[in-house]
Amino acid sequence: MSDQPCPGFRWLERGDGAPVVLLHGLMGSMHDWDPVLEILADGSRAIAPELPIFDPALSRVSVEGVAEWVVSFLDALGLEQVALGGNSLGGHVALAVALAAPERVSALILTGSSGLFERSFTRGVPHRPSAAFIREKMEEIFFDPALVTPEAVEAVRGSVLQPAIALRLIRMARAAKRNNLESYLGAITVPTLILWGREDRITPLAVAEHFHATMPGSTLIVLRHCGHAPMIEQPEAFGAITRAWLEESRLAGVLR
């Protein structure tokens, strides 16, 4: 974590150079980006904040509310313009920031992003979900189910058994589903890397192809044997591809 004083914010930071800010998903954390930050640190100031999705201080439990928080985070760090990326809900929020404050976003990196279609996981959830139920849902995220450890299952189960967290989880998931961005994507013209897992079962590959077809100047790269969270399942490939894309975009003069 950065040792810079910045009350109200928690984030990880590696390297120096042009800033790249990466946003985690609904049930993720800033540590999802640990290995990728290390790779991007070679040439970039790589940053991953902890989104306040379950923080009562976030009064607007919505994509727009988190997007406003991200802008306030950029302000707090003195970042006028950044390459902004995200996974799942984090990608959705990155898109919302690019639409609401386009002057703050020089490029986008999307992976498993919601905003067009995402399989709902809020239907049919038991009042007190068992570890087996949680494991089944978590295994849908990955191509390799071995990535779902007993410790991870218990951590998620412990969270969703807390009524306040479970309520905010459902509210945010429903708000994201209502916030469909299809009719607005054509207005986003910054360089965009769409880096997707071929075996994504939450936001299938067809979603990535639709993003690519709708967004001018986008690049689509697909990772084989990879699910909904490529930065966790294939961090080395994700980091190397993203770093190379950023370098090529800067050399081509399309990215500051």
Image (cartoon, rainbow, N blue to C red):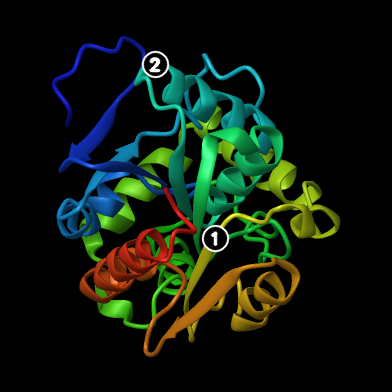
**C-alpha distance separating marks 1 and 2:** 25 Å
Residue placed under numbered mark 2 in the picture:
76
Left/right of residue 9 with respect to residue 167 in the rendered view: left
- For mark 2, does the 10 Å Cα neighbourhood hold few (<14), some (14 to 19), or many (20 or more) residues? some
Which of 253/47 is in front?
A: 253
- Quadrant in which residue 253 is drawn: bottom left
Q: Residue furthest right?
A: 183
Q: Examine the rendered structure and indicate whether residue 149 appears above or below residue 56.
A: below
- The amino acid beneath tag 1 is Pro
Q: Position of residue 31 (x, y in %)?
A: 25, 46
Q: Examine the rendered structure and indicate whether residue 25 appears above or below residue 3.
A: below
Q: Which mark is residue 191?
A: 1
Which of 238/57 is in front?
A: 238
Residue at 49% x, 86% y: name it. Answer: 198
Q: Which mark is residue 245?
A: none
- For mark 1, does the 10 Å Cα neighbourhood hold few (<14), some (14 to 19), or many (20 or more) residues? many
1 or 2: tag closer to the N-terminus:
2
